[in-house]
Amino acid sequence: MRLLTPTRRIRPSGRRSARAAAVFVGVALAAGATVPTASGAHATEAPEAVTVINAAHRGASAYYPENTLLSFREGIALGGDFAELDVQRSRDGELVVIHDTSLARTTNVEQLFPDRAPWKVSDFTHAEMLTLDAGSWKDPKFAGERIPTLAESIRTIRNSSGGMLLEIKAPELYPGIEAEVAAEMNTFPGYVQSAVSAGRLVVQSFNFGSMKAFKALEPTVPVGLLGTPTFAQLPELATWADQINPYHYSIDAAYVAEVHRLGMECLTWTVDSDADLRRAIDLGVDGVITNRPDALERILADRVARG
């Protein structure tokens, strides 16, 4: 699987997978550099370097209301290679983008619908959701932001320089959502094929069964497994999954190396402080999911500058 090629390359702290090396060679060739041929002849040796994916968690959610079109646009503008988002289903079957299974934290639903507690996403129609303010909870200046649909999110991200890291949220609450997500993607002619070819699409979930079902429906689309499976579980997962995407404090460099040895990639979450961002990079992960894509961009740029 090939992810979206990021704009920064940094010196590795350890050995990386052959897959990552192949990505770098492709970048080097595209940039006009020469690399060793089968005969060993070359004009310029490509420097040993690796790439780190910058995934904007729910967009640039440190600064903008999460999981809104504004946050996705700004997350990519601030250096994100991917906008990460969460998909659920409304009462009337619309695929909507929101993290919590309740509308309460990130909208004014309690004020508009006081008698509908606990305000589950699955209990509200899309039309009802459109009446909600999904921005003011973050800051009054974001008043009027709405809960976007998956289709709106695809359209926004597709027209940007970034890719989409889509989490199917709580699929056990939404039977059949895997097929619906696949169908929604395919309403955009050529989108899946072009996004996968460009390394601009990944689907992930904490529910491994859901990801296995999605992979059966869309075998070319890379799937990521959120969480930290044991070392013993990794070989079987590697027979069908493309990524293992764990919490950053739950892993060490040895775990990342094992994921790579089995041919998978590793994106870690949710990493925000400068110290934690540096630590995550040094673990050798393929990507970092962060609420502060600008901070990760700055740290990567600094490492490039320092060589």
Image (cartoon, rainbow, N blue to C red):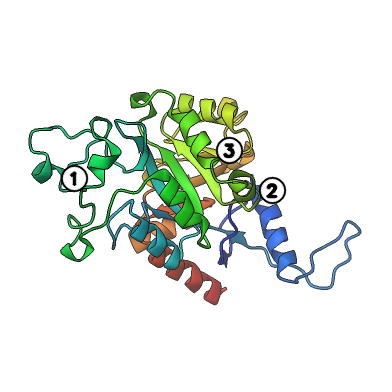
Rounded to the nearest angstrom, the CA distance separating label 1 from label 2 is 43 Å
Dot 2: few (<14), some (14–19), or many (≥20) neighbours within 10 Å? few
Callout in the foreground (2, 3): 3
Amino acid type, label 3: Asp
Circle 3 sits in a helix, a strand or a loop, which is it? loop
**Contact check, label 2 and label 3, Cβ < 8 Å:** no
Amino acid type, label 1: Arg
Q: Residue 18: which numbered mark, if any?
A: 2
Residue 290: x and y, percent?
Answer: 38, 55
Count the labels in the image. Answer: 3
Amino acid type, label 2: Ala
Q: Quadrant of the N terminus?
A: top right
According to the image, label 1 marks what residue? 105
Which residue sits at x=50%, y=29%?
A: 179
Which residue sits at x=42%, y=40%?
A: 167
Measured along the vertical axis of the image, is residue 217 above or below residue 100? above
Q: Quadrant of the C terminus?
A: bottom right
Measured along the vertical axis of the image, is residue 247 above or below residue 63? above
Residue 213: x and y, percent?
Answer: 52, 25
Q: In the picture provided, is 104 more to the left or to the right than 121?
A: left
Residue projecting furthest to the right: 39
According to the image, label 3 marks what residue? 242
Q: In the picture provided, is 244 more to the left or to the right than 71?
A: right
Point out the tag, 2 or 3, that comes first from the N-terminus: 2
Q: In the picture provided, is 185 more to the left or to the right than 277?
A: right
Point out the tag, 1 or 3, that comes first from the N-terminus: 1
Circle 2 sits in a helix, a strand or a loop, which is it? helix
Circle 1 sits in a helix, a strand or a loop, which is it? loop
Rounded to the nearest angstrom, the CA distance separating label 1 from label 3 is 32 Å
Q: Is residue 236 visible?
A: yes
Which residue sits at x=24%, y=34%?
A: 124
Dot 3: few (<14), some (14–19), or many (≥20) neighbours within 10 Å? many
